[in-house]
């Protein structure tokens, strides 16, 4: 653990009667990726907007790179880069105009700004699209120009608010590569996501937030351990055998088995993967035909179910 | 999503190139408020270049109004369209300018809804500069609108006694007033949720403000109470000034009036705008 890049204590923000962020304590060490995982409406964006000085906290304190987000907002702004959830570049302008605009605002001369814009476009595989309006970019290209725009002056800390939401798998991988590249160069990245596998892939540490509060914090291994090994999903041939199957599985796995909305499906969160094979053998011995089974990693839903006692979806704003 | 296929396939980010870009990041010294405002003004001009449709209001609207009022009312109000044009043109110039300032609020409201304003607000630049820059860009739009009205007027037979100097001075004053009035719209654009509601409220303010003035008719025929309203309406004073300058006289008192109301507009609506802007969710 080095010095802290972000430290918050009792951070709060309400909009009317909605407590978007209801007392968040974070300690993010410098270097690496810190993931903030939560469903829509959990308060991720509100938290990030306070840290990036766009929103004033109602209560609590937050220091970013050692500067208070309210008292030293300007010092914070000159050291962080923000890529918002929605296109944070001007869609009417071309890629190169967007980067040049930011370069000029950050103090580059016209000539150096042009060079910097060209370098960034090159590095992000956008050189050919430089003179095209951003609104004509594909989703993946748009995300890349968004991130490039945060790097005009290399920030010490980068906020990425749901950088891959809505992207196809290929573009998502490209964004992941960029994040890894930035971290390799010593940057600190705070990233919010709704996807457990994204946090898993990228983040060194993860805070799970729900209803504006941190409900768990740790490395992805620690979080998964707290959730269990994952879950078993089984589909049967005959719906009338489901009750019987539920009884058999519950007996072997020694956990609660949940019937799904699908009349032939069942799922169970498992603690001991060893028992899975035995439970399937038990089903076959009992004459219950299984058409499909899968052993899944714990999903965000399951993390939530375990950590908060309710499903992630119910939170969706 | 309108994906462009060719670039999708092009090389994505490579580690080495990314590294060099990140390492090369210099930290230039921060530019001052004037430069950042002008840079945002440049953004506004780029938007005009890429979306020229947004000039419709500064071109069609003034042409329509000048022609309609001259030929519909000219004969009835002043005996002949020519005589009326001489009276009307400076007024219609004021009206056209003041009306197209409304678009500032509508554009800004649309703009602020988008993520790009979050980025602007997270930059270490003088806070009002995105707004000031947008208004500076609008000055170009107002100038285009003014040039169109004046040229149309000249074609129709309007002859300013004050000559080029009078015309240029009156347009300059008009731009100052429009810039200051725009802070009313920036405030509205931060209070109201949608561009439509900004447009609606702006219309409700603008119609009485421009019509209950001396732009179209001499207020002498109006009832006394209405004359009193016209008398305090800053738009009337502005129209009087523009008329005077174009006619070759220098109505110093009236110019003072216009400048004072301009300063007041900024002094009142500027700070309110900035407070709203700072606390924008």
Image (cartoon, helix red, strand yellow):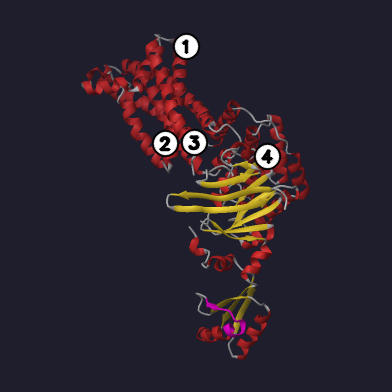
Q: Earlier in the sequence, mark 1 or mark 3?
A: 3
Give the CA distance from mark 1 to mark 4.
46 Å
How far across and down, in percent of the image, does residue A177 sit? 71, 53
Chain of the residue displaying label 1: B
Same subunit: marks 2 and 3? yes
Same subunit: marks 1 and 4? no
Mark 3 neighbour density, 10 Å: few (under 14) some (14–19) many (20 or more)? few
Residue behind mark 1: B165
State the residue at coordinates (60%, 87%): A283
Residue behind mark 4: A152
Q: Which mark is residue B53?
A: 3
- Residue A204 sits inside the magenta stretch: no
Instruction: Please state which of the two labelled residues, at mark 1 or mark 3, is closer to the viewer.
Output: 1
How far across and down, in percent of the image, does residue B203 sit? 36, 34
Give the CA distance from mark 1 to mark 2.
35 Å
Give the CA distance from mark 3 to mark 4.
31 Å
In this view, which residue lies farthest toward the left? B223
Give the CA distance from mark 4 to mark 2.
33 Å
The magenta span reads A249-259
Same subunit: marks 3 and 4? no
Left or right: residue B183 versus residue B88 is right
Residue behind mark 2: B188
Mark 4 neighbour density, 10 Å: few (under 14) some (14–19) many (20 or more)? many
Instruction: Please state which of the two labelled residues, at mark 1 or mark 2, is closer to the viewer.
Output: 2
State the residue at coordinates (47%, 18%): B172
Give the CA distance from mark 2 to mark 3.
23 Å
A81, above or below B213, in the image: below
How far across and down, in percent of the image, does residue A309 sit? 52, 68
Label 1's element? helix
């Amino acid at each position: 653990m080095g010095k802290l890049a972000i430290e918050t204590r009792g951070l709060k923000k309400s909009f009317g009667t909605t407590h978007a962020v209801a007392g968040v304590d974070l300690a993010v060490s410098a270097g690496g990726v810190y993931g903030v995982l939560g469903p829509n409406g959990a308060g991720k964006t509100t938290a990030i907007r306070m840290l990036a000085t766009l929103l004033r906290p109602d209560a609590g304190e937050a220091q970013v790179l050692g500067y208070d987000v309210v008292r030293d907002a300007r010092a914070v702004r000159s050291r962080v880069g923000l890529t918002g959830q929605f296109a944070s570049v001007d869609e009417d302008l071309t890629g190169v105009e967007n980067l040049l605009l930011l370069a000029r605002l950050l103090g580059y001369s016209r000539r150096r700004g042009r060079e910097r814009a060209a370098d960034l476009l090159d590095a992000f595989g956008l050189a050919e699209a430089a003179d095209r309006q951003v609104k004509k970019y594909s989703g993946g290209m748009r995300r890349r120009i968004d991130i490039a725009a945060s790097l005009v002056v290399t920030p010490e800390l980068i906020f990425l608010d749901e950088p891959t939401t809505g992207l196809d798998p290929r573009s998502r991988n490209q964004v992941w590569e960029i994040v890894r590249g930035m971290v390799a160069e010593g940057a600190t990245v705070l990233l919010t996501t709704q996807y457990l596998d994204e946090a898993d892939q990228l983040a060194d540490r993860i805070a799970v937030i729900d209803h504006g509060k941190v409900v768990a914090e740790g490395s992805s291994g620690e979080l998964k351990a707290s959730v269990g090994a994952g879950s078993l999903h089984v589909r049967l041939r005959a719906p009338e055998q489901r009750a019987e199957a539920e009884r058999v599985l519950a007996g072997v796995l020694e956990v609660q088995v949940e019937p799904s909305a699908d009349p032939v499906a069942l799922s169970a969160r498992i603690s001991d993967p060893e028992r899975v094979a035995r439970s399937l053998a038990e089903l076959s011995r009992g004459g219950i035909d299984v058409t499909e089974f899968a052993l899944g990693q714990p999903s965000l839903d399951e993390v939530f179910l375990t950590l908060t006692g309710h499903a992630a979806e119910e939170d969706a704003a | 999503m309108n994906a462009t296929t060719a670039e999708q396939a092009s090389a994505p980010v490579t580690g080495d190139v990314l590294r060099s870009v990140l390492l090369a990041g210099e930290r230039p010294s921060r530019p001052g408020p004037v430069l950042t405002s002008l840079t945002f003004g440049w953004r506004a001009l780029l938007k005009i270049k890429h979306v020229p449709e947004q000039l419709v209001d500064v071109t069609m609207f003034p042409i329509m109004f000048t022609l309609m009022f001259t030929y519909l009312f000219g004969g009835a109000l002043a005996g002949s369209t020519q005589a009326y044009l001489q009276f009307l043109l400076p007024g219609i110039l004021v009206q056209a300018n003041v009306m197209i300032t409304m678009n500032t609020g509508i554009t800004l409201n649309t703009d602020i809804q988008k993520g790009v304003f979050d980025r602007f607000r997270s930059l270490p630049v003088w806070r009002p500069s995105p707004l000031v820059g947008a208004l500076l860009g609008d000055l170009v739009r107002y100038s285009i609108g003014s040039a169109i009205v004046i040229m149309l007027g000249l074609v129709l037979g309007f002859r300013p006694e004050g000559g080029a100097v009078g015309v240029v001075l009156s347009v300059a004053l008009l731009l100052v007033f429009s810039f200051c009035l725009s802070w009313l719209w920036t405030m509205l654009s931060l209070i109201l949720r949608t561009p439509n509601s900004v447009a609606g409220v702006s219309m409700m303010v603008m119609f009485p403000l421009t019509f209950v003035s001396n732009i179209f008719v001499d207020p002498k025929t109006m009832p006394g109470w209405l004359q009193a309203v016209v008398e305090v309406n800053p738009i009337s004073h502005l129209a009087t000034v523009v008329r005077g300058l174009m006619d070759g006289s220098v109505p110093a008192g009236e110019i003072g009036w216009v400048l004072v109301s301009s300063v007041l507009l900024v002094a009142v609506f500027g700070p309110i705008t900035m407070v709203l802007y700072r606390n924008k969710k």
